[in-house]
Amino acid sequence: MDTMSERLYIGIDLGTYQSTIASSSGTIHTVETIVGRPKDPVARNMLKRDVLFGADALKHKMSCDLYRPMAKGVTQDDEANLAAA
């Protein structure tokens, strides 16, 4: 049995505007790199979620505060990451 032929390799590219996941089987999936959080409790109840991603966040952009989690190659969740950029 050849274990090399059974391996599946995955590649992930986290970009500022788009992120892509590709596999050695030829599957490629690209999503918008954007996150939405409901602006207020009314929006939270309407959306029934605390966080929205990609096209779903853009679809509900009037009800959400949007941000891009990647910028200048670093995640935007930590002041230390921003200082390093």
Image (cartoon, rainbow, N blue to C red):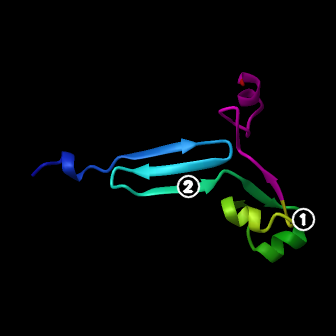
Q: Mark 2 = which residue? A: 30
Under mark 2, the amino acid is Thr
Between tags 2 and 1, which lies in front?
Answer: 2
Crowdedness of circle 1 by 10 Å Cα count: few (<14), some, many (20+)? few
Under mark 1, the amino acid is Asp
Q: What label does residue 58 carry, if any?
A: none
Crowdedness of circle 2 by 10 Å Cα count: few (<14), some, many (20+)? some
| Residue sitting nearer the eye, 63 or 22 | 22
Mark 2 vs 1, N-terminal side = 2
Q: Quadrant of the C terminus?
A: top right
Which residue is located at x 50 percent, y 57 percent?
Answer: 29
Q: Locate residue 7, reporting x and y percent.
A: 26, 49
User: On the picture, is 65 further left or further right than 78?
Assistant: right
Q: Is residue 50 visible?
A: no
Q: Is residue 55 visible?
A: yes
Query: Outermost residue, bottom direction?
Result: 46
Residue 2 in magenta?
no
Magenta stretch: give its range: 65-84
Report which quarter residue 46 is drawn in.
bottom right
| Residue sitting nearer the eye, 6 or 32 | 32
Q: Mark 1 = which residue? A: 40
Report which quarter residue 81 is drawn in.
top right
User: On the picture, is 75 further left or further right than 44?
Assistant: left
